[in-house]
Structure formats: C-alpha cells, structure tokens
C-alpha cells in the first residue's frame, strides 16, 4: 500500500496533481469535510465545524486505509500547513498501519498563481496568507520521503477550473 499526503497552500494545484498522477487512488480530501462550514450561522458555529472537519477527515483517512488493499494508493489531500496538522494525520495513519507515508508539497510559481487569479484578489490573499503560514514538511516528521513539486498550469480560467474540483 502506498500512502501519500499531498499538501500546499490553496490554489497550489493539489487536486489537479492528484487527478493527473494518481487517477485510481483512494482520495480523502479535508475540503469535503470543511464544506459543511457554509451552513454555519455564527462564527462560533463555524469554528466548531472547522475543528470537527479535521476529526471527521482523520476518521475517513483511517477507515480508507483499513479498507485498502496492498496494491492501493491512499492520498490525503489537504493544506496541512503546520507540522502540528501533519502530525495529527500521521498519528492517525500509525494507528492503523506501519506502511511508509510520503509527502508531496506543491510549490507553484507565485507569478503564475497571481496571473491565474488576477481577477480574484481575495483568492490571491488566501494563497499568500497560507504560503506564509506554511512550515515545510521534513523526513524528521516521520515521512519516508518528502518531495517538492513545481507544477505547471495551463493558461486557462483558473477560477472556473477550481470550482470544478
């Protein structure tokens, strides 16, 4: 079994990378669990939903690994900007398997991101904020390998592409 964490700031190309490189993988995406935050009526409710999203995603990751065969690839798709966040999910993996876990950090060209999102300054701000918060993953955290990928994006309507993901 191959277990892979695909990380990086918002709009770094995680979903696109996974679709291109791991078409048959079993993907657990933290954003699936965060989408319920749209239903929050108060900030307090929003914070609780966000906290719970990590726990639900953690359980989904563990269950996906339990059900996976030796030939499967299981991918966790999440920003995982901090070492603490990565450790939270690495510990979950260790509860169910001792299989090696690899990490892929997507590092897109910042000028290209700015070009692609030029009509959406809020999205550029989100990407830049997350990039500043990013703690670079390392093997010392418990990863069998850490790979930095510098994705190339086609000239396209990025916002429309992101909405499809």
Image (cartoon, grey):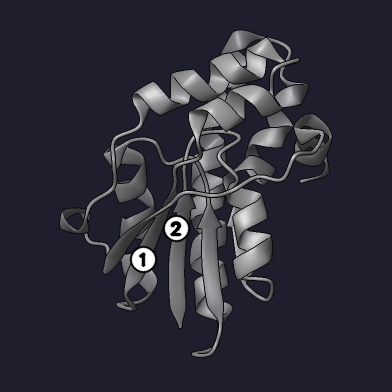
Q: Residues within 10 Å of mark 2 (few under 14, many from 20)?
A: many
* Dot 2 or dot 1, earlier in sequence: 2
Q: Quadrant of residue 115?
A: top right
**Residue tagged by mark 2?**
5
Rendered location of residue 37, percent (x, y): 68, 27
Q: For the residue labelled by badge 1, is the local secondary structure a helix, a strand or a loop? A: strand
Determine whether label 2 and label 1 are within 8 Å by CB. yes
Q: Is residue 17 left or right of residue 82?
A: right
Q: CA separation, marks 2 and 1? A: 6 Å
Q: Which mark is residue 102?
A: 1
Q: Is residue 15 above or below residue 22?
A: above
Q: Quadrant of residue 44?
A: top right
The total number of labels drawn is: 2
Q: Is residue 92 shown to the viewer in this render?
A: yes
Query: Looking at this view, is 160 or 40 the one in front?
Result: 160
Q: Is residue 99 left or right of residue 111?
A: left
Q: Residue furthest bottom?
A: 70
Query: Looking at this view, is 107 or 101 the one in front?
Result: 107
Rendered location of residue 73, percent (x, y): 54, 76
Q: Is residue 106 left or right of residue 135?
A: right
Q: Is residue 49 shown to the viewer in this render?
A: no
């Amino acid at each position: 079994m191959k277990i892979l964490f695909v990380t990086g700031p918002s709009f770094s190309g995680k979903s696109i990378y996974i679709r291109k490189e791991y078409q048959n993988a079993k993907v657990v995406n933290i954003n699936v669990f965060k989408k319920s935050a749209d239903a929050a009526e108060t900030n307090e409710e929003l914070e609780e939903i966000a906290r719970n999203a990590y726990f639900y995603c953690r359980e989904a990751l563990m269950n996906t690994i339990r059900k996976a065969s030796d030939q499967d690839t299981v991918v966790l798709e999440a920003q995982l900007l901090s070492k603490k966040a990565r450790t939270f999910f690495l510990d979950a993996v260790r509860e169910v398997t001792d299989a090696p876990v690899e990490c892929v950090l997507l590092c897109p060209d910042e000028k290209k991101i700015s070009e692609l999102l030029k009509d959406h300054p809020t999205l550029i701000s989100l990407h830049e904020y997350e990039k500043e918060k990013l703690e670079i993953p390392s093997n010392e955290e418990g990863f069998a390998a850490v790979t930095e990928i510098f994705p190339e994006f086609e000239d396209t309507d990025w916002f429309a592409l992101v909405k499809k993901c």
